Amino acid sequence: MDGTLGAGGHASGILEASAPDGKLLGLDVDPQALELARRTLAPFGERACLMQASYTALPRCLSSLGWETVDGILLDLGASSMQFDTPGRGFSFLQDGPLDMRFDPLNPLTAAQIVNEWPEDELANVIHRYGEEPAARRIARVIVRSRPVGGTRALAAVIEQALGRRRSPGSSTGRRSPGSSTGRGPRHPATQAFQALRIAVNGELEAVEETLPLAVQALGPGGRLAVISFHSLEDRLVKETFRRESRDCLCPTKQPVCTCGHKASIIEINRRPVTPSEEETSQNPRARSAKLRIAERLPVHHE
Ligand SMILES: C[S@@+](CC[C@H](N)C(=O)[O-])C[C@H]1O[C@@H](n2cnc3c(N)ncnc32)[C@H](O)[C@@H]1O
């Protein structure tokens, strides 16, 4: 199962590797992505079953096909290149577009609502938490003073104004987002705030947190869950879930006898995340902050 089809690149790799009779369920909440994936995966015919759905709905999607378990699940989190490069979707400040940022066009929350309607405190919290932006309060104050903010370029200008001369592109932490810019060259001062808004609009962290245990449950014994994340908070969620679910007991270490009865359901395949090589990032700069973690499902009655 590919829970984040995008343009279908990974899905097509999975279908090639599982030829001649491997089947793939592919999900994406974005109908435009689904259309792209449909074209990419057309050569695989009925081996690919695609649905417009959130990966949070994974159990329902599997049971609609009559599948109890799967051999592998991939979640490649965040936004796709198509989404970043389509100005009308509002994910990027490189071209002007509406403050939208929704993966799912039926999502009632847009970036415009957060930017133009949310109280200053809540706006600052979003930018601080999801963007890990130290100047979040200052940025929120200047945004609120500049309301209404019309589009992506206007928002980027307001953020630049809030940061003043203190942060020129390239002088920040050195971490890069794969998408709010091309991934090449210095980091724009608005990158972190844009990333934060996107995460809030789409409830990305909540969706990952809700889905990881469901994904583990959906794997047959020996099945693998692979998660690629681009954000430290996402990676932490994946790491903590994998650590917890690979332990037999969650009682405090000082407690002599286990009372929780927790049993490990997975083993971690890699304790350290897999990161792209220099060669890969030079071919695909947007991959540079990617981290891949993999876990394998244990037999259900593991003791
Ligand atoms: C990084 S892209 C995946 C790219 C893909 N692996 C490929 O090979 O082209 C992430 C995709 O996940 C989708 N997405 C984000 N949140 C989702 C969710 N909750 N459920 C399903 N798809 C989601 C986005 O719409 C986007 O198309």
Image (cartoon, rainbow, N blue to C red):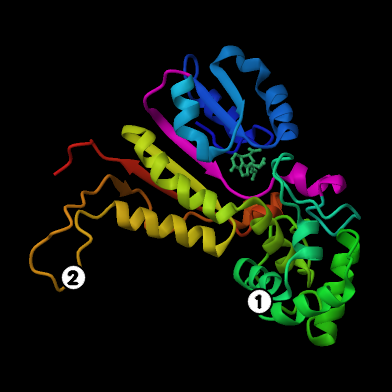
Q: Residue 261 versus residue 291: which sits nearer the camera?
A: 261
Q: CA distance from mark 1 to mark 2?
A: 36 Å
Q: Residues within 10 Å of mark 2 (few under 14, many from 20)?
A: few
Q: Residues within 10 Å of mark 1 (few under 14, many from 20)?
A: few
Q: Residue 230 versus residue 164: which sits nearer the camera?
A: 164
Q: Are marks 1 and 2 in contact (CB under 8 Å)?
A: no
- Secondary structure, mark 1, is loop
Horizontal placement of 128 versus 181: left or right? left
Task: Give me the residue at 59% from left, 52% from top.
Answer: 204
> Toward which corner of the image does residue 26 lie, by quadrant?
top right
Q: Amino acid at mark 1?
A: Thr
Q: Quadrant of the C terminus?
A: top left
Task: Give me the residue at 82% from left, 73% from top.
Answer: 143
Q: Is residue 77 shown in magenta?
A: yes
Horizontal placement of 293 versus 163: left or right? left
| Magenta-drawn segment | 65-89
Q: Is residue 240 visible?
A: yes
x and y, in percent, of residue 282 in the image: 69, 54
Q: Which residue is mark 2?
A: 253
x and y, in percent, of residue 33 in the image: 71, 34
Q: Amino acid at mark 2?
A: Thr
Q: Does 7 sit above or below residue 145? A: above
x and y, in percent, of residue 55 in the image: 54, 38
Q: Quadrant of ligand 1?
A: top right
Q: Does 210 sit above or below residue 21? A: below
Horizontal placement of 245 versus 26: left or right? left
Q: Which residue is mark 1?
A: 173
Q: Residue 180 versus residue 199: which sits nearer the camera?
A: 199
